[in-house]
Amino acid sequence: MENKEIFSVFFREKPAMMLVELKNAKSTIYASSLAKSVDCTYSHVVKILQEMEKAGLVNFEKQGRLKLLTLTKSGSEIADHIDGIRVKL
């Protein structure tokens, strides 16, 4: 089984990769750019991000008409663990 396949056995791939992408972002990131980087629709990304916000994993910061995304401390820790597991697989 390919690494990516075994990873998706344990994790839903898109939400897990969204956290990892946010963690690894070198600059400001928005829902639209996140959607492109994880190959997902904008509306699906926003729905997942809203769930992550409720769980205390991400923050939305309004900047004019745009919403900047940032990880919370626990969101960052979880992203580190997910990325570590992905690398090991």
Image: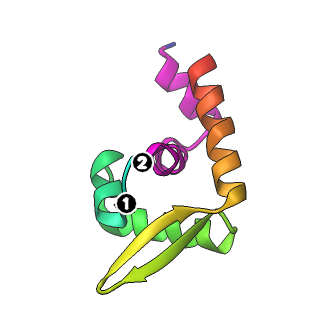
Residue 77: x, y in percent?
70, 47
What range of the chain is rendered magenta? 2-24
Residue 72 horizontal side relative to residue 40, left or right: right
In the orientation shown, which residue stands out farthest toward the top?
A: 1
Residue at image point 59% right, 33% down: 83
Mark 1 nearby-residue class (10 Å; few <14, some 14–19, many ≥20) = few
| Magenta-drawn stretch contains 86 | no
In the rendered image, which residue does mark 2 sit on? 25
In the rendered image, which residue does mark 1 sit on? 28
Q: Please tell me the numbered disc located at residue 13.
A: none
Residue 74 horizontal side relative to residue 15, left or right: right
Residue at image point 54% right, 33% down: 8
In the figure, 9 relative to 50: above or below? above
Q: What is the chief secondary structure element of the magenta stretch?
A: helix
Q: Can residue 89 be seen in the rendering of this structure? A: no
Mark 2 nearby-residue class (10 Å; few <14, some 14–19, many ≥20) = few
Front residue of 78/73: it is: 73
What amino acid type should be assigned to the residue bearing mark 1?
Answer: Thr
In the orientation shown, which residue stands out farthest toward the bottom?
A: 64
Task: Tell me which corner region of the image, top left, top right, bottom left or bottom right, holds residue 58.
Answer: bottom right
What amino acid type should be assigned to the residue bearing mark 2?
Answer: Ala
Q: Can residue 64 be seen in the rendering of this structure? A: yes
- Do the residues under discs 2 and 1 have CB atoms within 8 angstroms? yes
| Magenta-drawn stretch contains 19 | yes
**Which part of the image, by quadrant, shows the C terminus?**
top right
Disc 2 from disc 1: Cα separation: 7 Å
In the figure, 1 relative to 20: above or below? above
